Image (cartoon, rainbow, N blue to C red):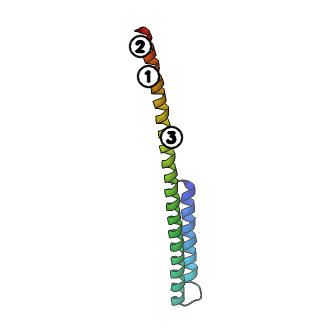
Amino acid sequence: MNKNQKFLIGSIGALLTGIAIGLLVAPKDGKETRKLIKNKANDLGGNAKDKYEKSLEELSHLADRLKDGFLKNVSSAKEKANGVADNVSEKVRGVVNNNA
């Protein structure tokens, strides 16, 4: 984990802690405050879950594209190798026939 990632995680943690403390000392009764904290936590959890699922979908799409590209390159390399092998084989036959 690099320096920027650590800073971002620390900043988000500090922000959430500040919000929670602010809600706890706000002039609302305990029941309202707990409900508000619960709702905010659920919202954050839902957003994180949505982003996680979207990231998984994007990674899956990227993996499919990489796989297709890899298979295409392998196929192209096979075709070129077969062409070179055929060319070498023809030249060898020509040399053998000329020397016979």
Q: Nearer the viewer, residue 49 or 37?
A: 49
- The reply to whether discs 3 and 2 touch (Cβ–Cβ < 8 Å) is no
From the viewer's perspective, is the residue at label 3 or at label 1 nearer? 1
Residue at 47% across, 18% down: 91
Give the residue at mark 2. 96
Disc 3 target residue = 73
Say whether disc 1 or disc 2 marks the residue closer to the N-terminus: 1
Residue at 50%, 73% in the rendered image: 45
Q: Nearer the viewer, residue 67 or 31?
A: 67
Q: Earlier in the sequence, mark 3 or mark 1?
A: 3
User: For the residue marked with disc 3, what is the amino acid?
Assistant: Asn
Residue at label 1? 89
Q: State the SS at label 1.
A: helix
Foreground label between 3 and 2: 2
**Residue ID at (46%, 35%):** 78
Where, by quadrant of the figure, is residue 98 drawn?
top left
Q: Residues within 10 Å of mark 2 (few under 14, many from 20)?
A: few
Q: CA distance from mark 1 to mark 2?
A: 10 Å
Residue 8 in percent (x, y) is at 57, 62
Against 22, is 59 above or below? above
Q: Secondary structure at mark 3?
A: helix
The crowding category of the residue bearing disc 3, from other C-alpha atoms within 10 Å (few below 14, some 14 to 19, many at least 20), is: few
